[in-house]
Image (cartoon, rainbow, N blue to C red):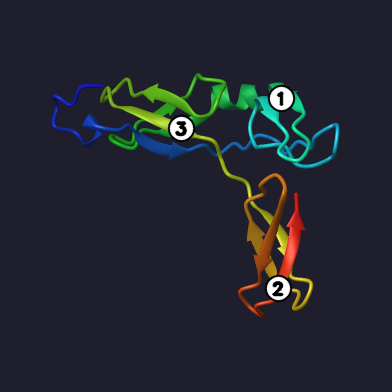
Amino acid sequence: MSGDDGDISNDAPLDVDSSIAPPLINCPNCDGLLPLGLGEKTCTLCDAVVSVDHEATRKEWMDERVACPSCSKVLVCGVDDRPATVACSSCANQFIINPKVVKVEISCPACERRLRLKPRPGSRQIICPACEESFKVTF
């Protein structure tokens, strides 16, 4: 983690986004959307603690190929969790592979415009950019 080479990576590691998203999982108690990711998740609607695991996603994360942001060498991640810190074997820089953020498409109830949102647990008040209609969305 020392920046003796004069590289950009001397303070904070660079970031790369994963191309593999964990599945969207609903709470078994209230059917609301759980926070994105694998592991122990707490439902923001009913406070239930749920253990989320998806073996297929973990396997894909292990085998995921990413390009080093410093030298562009393609590496196999080899880590079954996100975010993950990875060190490039070619240039020795460290970088973080962040989880992919999925987006859902919804329609404005007033004008039918298609809107893409990051699904977050709970309810949100949305204002359509096309017609300025305000409506509530619950994930």
Compared with residue 126, is residue 123 higher up or lower down, i.e. above or below?
above
What x and y, as percent, mark residue 132? 65, 78
Q: Is residue 21 left or right of residue 33?
A: left
Q: Is residue 24 left or right of residue 66?
A: right
Looking at the rendering, in which quadrant would you find the N terminus? top left
Q: How many marks?
A: 3
Q: Count residues near mark 2 (Cα–Cα under 10 Å), then give few for <14, some for 14-19, many for 20+.
A: some
* Marked residue nearer the N-terminal end (2 or 3): 3
Residue 134 quadrant: bottom right
Q: Secondary structure at mark 1?
A: loop
Q: Amino acid at mark 2?
A: Arg
Q: Is residue 8 left or right of residue 137?
A: left
Q: Amino acid at mark 1?
A: His
In this view, the residue in front, 23 or 12, is 12
- The CA distance from mark 2 to mark 3 is 33 Å
Compared with residue 135, is residue 28 higher up or lower down, i.e. above or below?
above
Residue at x-position 42% and y-position 26%: 75
What x and y, as percent, mark residue 126? 67, 65
What x and y, as percent, mark residue 15? 39, 37
* Circle on res. 97: 3
Identify residue for label 2: 113
* Marked residue nearer the N-terminal end (3 or 1): 1
